[in-house]
Image: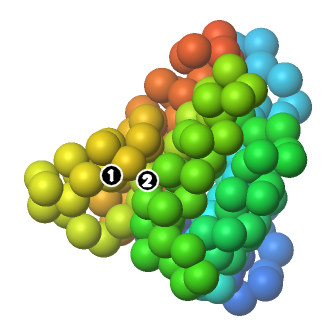
Amino acid sequence: MFESRARGAGALALLLGWSCPPDPRPVLHARRSGLAEHTLRILLAEDNVANQALAAGLLRRDRHAVTIVDNGVAAVAAAITGDFDVVLMDIQMPVMSGLDATMEIRRHEVSTGKHLHIIAMTAHVMQADRTRCLAAGVDDYLPKPIATDALRRALSRTAGARAVGIVFLMGR
């Protein structure tokens, strides 16, 4: 119970711009696994500023390199021109939805032969919503609010294909 509260306090501190000591567990796990300093290069496509701050702060604290965009058009542009391991794609964004952005990225991949792992994040949690996300071309699906273990498993599946271990902590 204390551990859960401590993580929540850390997330709140990040949102408020306060500094807080990093959780030593990711570093210990990273050393045991022999991981590089930057575990993953992540494109975070999220329009909500509070969600951006929370997710990016926690990802960076765990030594992931994070680039943030706030709409689907920017997500497509960054995914096509950048060098990312994974996209955390909010499905409901302005300008272009996350599903439309995913389909654009997949169309571009046909010409390059590359595949960018895309994890959909959405508050829509019905089976039909999951099916719609997968049909649009996402590789994985996470309902919001994001559960720590579910996100860890999704990122591990991403990295598993690249033979990289993952460490990620995110409070509920």
Label 2 SS: strand
Name the residue nearer the viewer: 128 or 86.
Answer: 128
x then y, percent, for residue 17: 78, 84
Residue at x 55% of width, y 28% of height? 158
Q: Quadrant of residue 5?
A: bottom left
Kind of residue sitting beneath label 1: Cys
Q: Which mark is residue 133?
A: 1
Residue 106 visible: yes
Q: Earlier in the sequence, mark 1 or mark 2?
A: 2
Q: Nearer the viewer, mark 1 or mark 2?
A: 1
Q: Is residue 13 left or right of residue 95?
A: right
What residue appears at the point 87 percent right and 31 percent down from the top-left corner? Answer: 37
Three-letter amino acid code at the position of disc 2: Ala
Tell me the SS state at disc 1: helix
What is the number of the mark on residue 109? none
Give the residue at x 65% y 33%.
109
Say if 15 sits above or below 6 in the image: below
- Residue receiving disc 2: 120
Q: How is the image coloured?
A: rainbow
Give residue 131's position: percent from left, percent from top. Answer: 21, 47
Q: Nearer the viewer, residue 74 or 9?
A: 74
Look at the numbered discs 1 and 2 and tell me whether their residues touch, using CB distance below 8 Å.
Answer: yes
